[in-house]
Image (cartoon, helix red, strand yellow):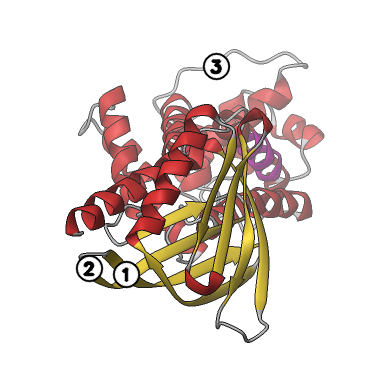
């Protein structure tokens, strides 16, 4: 019998598999996989070693069953019914809150998943689950980068900021160094979001981001006179894996007109806002459809009259438009004041 532990009630036949897995989870979380042996698991579960082998072939089989159960449980707790159709920062905050809540409510399961390397004993079924979960995370990160929401850095860099921050936060709370009030959790989520987001709001750029791509127009040079402001900038298009970039000319009045049309469409969730640069190098329509769906469509030429026209269609929804309007409003105020 383990020292310092009172004898446990022997489980019934129906309870024995669950008792073995619960005992293994405690020991793996406390001691690690390699420092835990089968007799110790059996003793903690209040079953004989022979009984344990009746249900599980060996320690690796126990660990794999436990890994799959806990991994699925955590994925469901964090990602099931995650809010859709909301601004990216709100969705990230919901993900963050759920992740922290799971870690605090299931400390052994969280420690088992996050503090141990599982590769040495995972079987093909566990590896397949691991690949499936990671593929979903990578796909989400890729959508975030493509739409201009997340910084254009490697998945492992983003993961280090997110997972590392959550682990440290939870550890500080479990060790009594921090009280995880809702306010503290939200503050931490905001700090992490600031670290990984692309940072759309600048005085010299506006971005239209969607689920399948993004359009950015940056201001590089502006000459203002009595007739208004003439601007030279760079247009960048990313759509369904295709990318194009080139210099464009436009006026501050063009930007102001587009801002006005887009704001009107956003208020009613109907209509079309249009924008075109000089010589129609970039022609853009923002079309508001049914149920809040929005489409950016148009054409773009990296160099005028070279026959390299890119046609694009980018799907999104109205939740992305508010950020674009905020950027456009700042630009209109700046260049409007300069006229």
Q: Is residue 66 magenta?
A: yes
Residue 211, image x and y in percent?
A: 60, 49
Nearest the eye: 140 or 333: 333
Residue 258, image x and y in percent?
A: 44, 50
- Relative vertical location of residue 2 with respect to residue 304 in this rendering, above or below: above
At label 2, counting other C-alpha atoms closer than 10 Å, the crowd grade (few under 14, some 14-19, many 20 or more) is some
Q: What is the secondary structure assignment of the residue under circle 2?
A: strand
Contact (Cβ within 8 Å) of mark 3 with mark 1: no
Residue occupying the point 58% across, 34% down: 79
Contact (Cβ within 8 Å) of mark 2 with mark 1: yes
Q: Is residue 73 magenta?
A: no
Give the magenta part as a residue range: 63-72
Q: Which residue is mark 2?
A: 224
Residue occupying the point 54% across, 67% down: 282
Q: Which residue is mark 1?
A: 230
Contact (Cβ within 8 Å) of mark 2 with mark 3: no
Q: Point out which mark residue 8 bears.
A: 3
Within the image, what quadrant is residue 280 found in? bottom right
Residue 21, image x and y in percent?
A: 64, 31
Between marks 2 and 3 in the image, the one whose residue lies nearer the viewer: 2
Asked whether residue 259 appears in the rendered view, the answer is: yes
At label 3, counting other C-alpha atoms closer than 10 Å, the crowd grade (few under 14, some 14-19, many 20 or more) is few
Please give left or right for residue 331 compared with residue 79 in the image. left
């Amino acid at each position: 019998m383990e020292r310092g532990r009172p004898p446990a009630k022997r489980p019934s036949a129906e309870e024995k598999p669950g008792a073995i897995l619960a005992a293994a989870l405690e020991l793996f979380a406390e001691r690690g996989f390699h420092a835990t042996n089968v007799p110790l698991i059996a003793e903690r579960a209040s079953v004989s070693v022979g009984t344990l082998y009746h249900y599980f072939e060996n320690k690796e089989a126990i660990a794999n069953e436990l890994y799959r159960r806990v991994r699925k449980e955590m994925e469901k707790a964090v990602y099931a019914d995650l809010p859709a159709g909301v601004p990216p920062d709100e969705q990230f905050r919901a993900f963050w809150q759920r992740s922290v809540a799971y870690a605090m409510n299931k400390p052994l399961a969280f420690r088992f998943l996050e503090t141990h390397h599982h590769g040495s004993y995972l079987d093909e079924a566990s590896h397949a689950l691991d690949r499936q979960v990671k593929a979903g995370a990578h796909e989400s990160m890729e959508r975030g980068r493509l739409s201009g929401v997340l910084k254009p850095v490697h998945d492992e860099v983003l993961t280090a900021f997110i997972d590392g921050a959550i682990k440290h936060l939870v550890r500080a709370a479990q060790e009594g160094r921090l009280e995880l009030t809702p306010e503290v959790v939200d503050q931490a989520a905001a700090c992490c979001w600031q670290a990984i987001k692309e940072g759309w709001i600048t005085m010299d750029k506006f971005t239209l981001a969607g689920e399948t791509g993004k359009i950015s127009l940056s201001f590089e040079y502006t000459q203002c006179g009595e007739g208004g402001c003439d601007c030279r900038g760079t247009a960048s298009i990313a759509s369904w894996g295709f990318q194009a970039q080139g210099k464009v000319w436009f006026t501050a009045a063009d930007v102001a007109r587009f801002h006005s049309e887009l704001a009107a469409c956003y208020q009613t969730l109907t209509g079309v806002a249009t924008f075109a640069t000089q010589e129609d190098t970039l022609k853009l329509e923002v079309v508001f459809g049914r149920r809040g769906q929005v489409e950016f469509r148009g054409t773009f030429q990296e160099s005028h009259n070279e026959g390299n026209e890119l046609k694009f269609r980018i799907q999104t929804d109205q939740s992305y438009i508010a950020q674009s309007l905020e950027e456009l409003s700042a630009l209109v105020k700046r260049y409007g004041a300069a006229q």
